Image (cartoon, grey):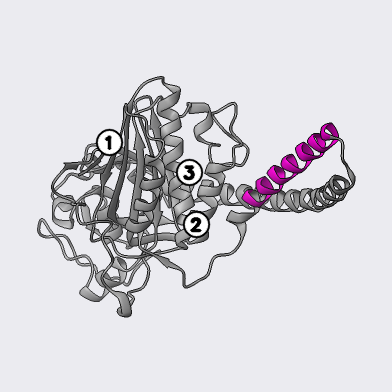
Amino acid sequence: MTPPQNHRPVRDAHPVLLSPTAKAWADALSAAMVWVDAEGRLLELNLAAEAMTGRTRKSALETPAAALFPELAEWLGKEGAVRGTIAVETAEGTRRTMAAALSALSDEGVRVLELTDLQGVLEEARAGVERDVRAANATLLRNLAHEIKNPLGGIRGAAQLLRSELTNPDDLECVGVVLSETERLMRLTERILSPYRPQRADARANLLPVLERVRRVVEKDLPESVELVRDYDISLPAVKGDEERLTQVFLNLATNALEALARQGGGGTVRIRTRIVRDARLLEGPVRQAASVEVEDDGPGVPDELQEQIFYPLVTTRAEGTGLGLALVKSCVEGCGGAVQLESRPGRTVFRVLLPLAPPDLSNSIPNAPDSTTSAATPSSTPNGTRHE
């Protein structure tokens, strides 16, 4: 892709290759573009290239091109347009492999190098495949749940009718088992279906009351050897999403963290952290700001072989688990446009939920803090083992 040309011979260290209009045009492009001369000197780059290399225009132009693109000299020695992959040395000292195309811009030897982040392309492709797999799994589970619910309703009705006709205690006990197990299966199918029901488009939630509700539930069974730490940003704005579903999301994550600590046979720490993050990637793409809720534990971690599939239905690390909890988490979070991520190694597991911010609500612009003792700056302790940070 070639912007409007305004080239003049190179006479100084920072030549003006593009007119202000052409430079603004180039900066508006999402593609990273770099202009070089026949000797391999950098003449210009756009904003996308600055972001990709981690360098400002001034520092990039003062850096030898060979230091930024070690393979560029070989490319310049070839005739015509060149396409392939090229290494880019970033300002942080890391090397990234980019898809690249080098083409002539003028008869004076000026060429333009267009760069595409392969990692970003691969991540987008991978995300697309995961969305397709999850959509297929959701359809399968919905159909399966409906097919199970219909005969279960018939079994329950027949058992209730039979119970009304029986007098023998043993027979009544057997019918009671049938009814209780039927009810359990009915609840299980409801759990399968609930995350896939559409949420209201205007649903909004204040996360701090939601997380405090989760904390109160979790503390009822909190072992003395486990510490629950709250690290809240109390200025966190409202997010898009249904409060009841988000409560279930974070209750599942907190419960999983406690179960992970129980599996390692000792105590530990579960930390719930909220922050505003910038340049987050949500379900529909990148956003400038999002709310982040992290549930972290120092348990044994998720096995490497399960980390890629941990959010799929019926995948679990526990022999007695159903494998529906994390699938419900992901479905609920994505249902309100968010994203959920996992980082895990022995001694540190973090489930990170990213949620889009809700539009301002002028009728209730000041969110309620969870309680008067919560502080983002001053740690305090409570008798039940919960600590604020």
Assess whether mark 3 and mark 1 are in contact (beta carbons under 8 angstroms). Answer: no
Q: Tell me which amino acid carries mark 3.
A: Asn
Judging depth in this view, the residue of 146 and 62 nearest the camera is 146
**Front: mark 2 or 1:** 1
Q: CA distance from mark 1 to mark 3?
A: 20 Å
Which residue in the structure is indicated by mark 3?
252
The reply to whether residue 88 is in sight is: yes
In the image as oriented, which residue stretches furthest toward the left? 12
Residue 44: mark in rendering: none
Of the two numbered discs 2 and 3 on the same chain, state the one appearing first in sequence: 2
Residue 185 among those drawn in magenta: yes
Q: Tell me which amino acid carries mark 1.
A: Gly
Which residue is drawn at the image coordinates 90% and 47% (left, top)?
A: 165
Q: Tell me which amino acid carries mark 2.
A: Arg
**Residue 44: image location, x then y, percent:** 23, 59
**Front: mark 1 or 3:** 1
Judging depth in this view, the residue of 202 and 103 nearest the camera is 202
- Secondary structure under tag 3 reads helix
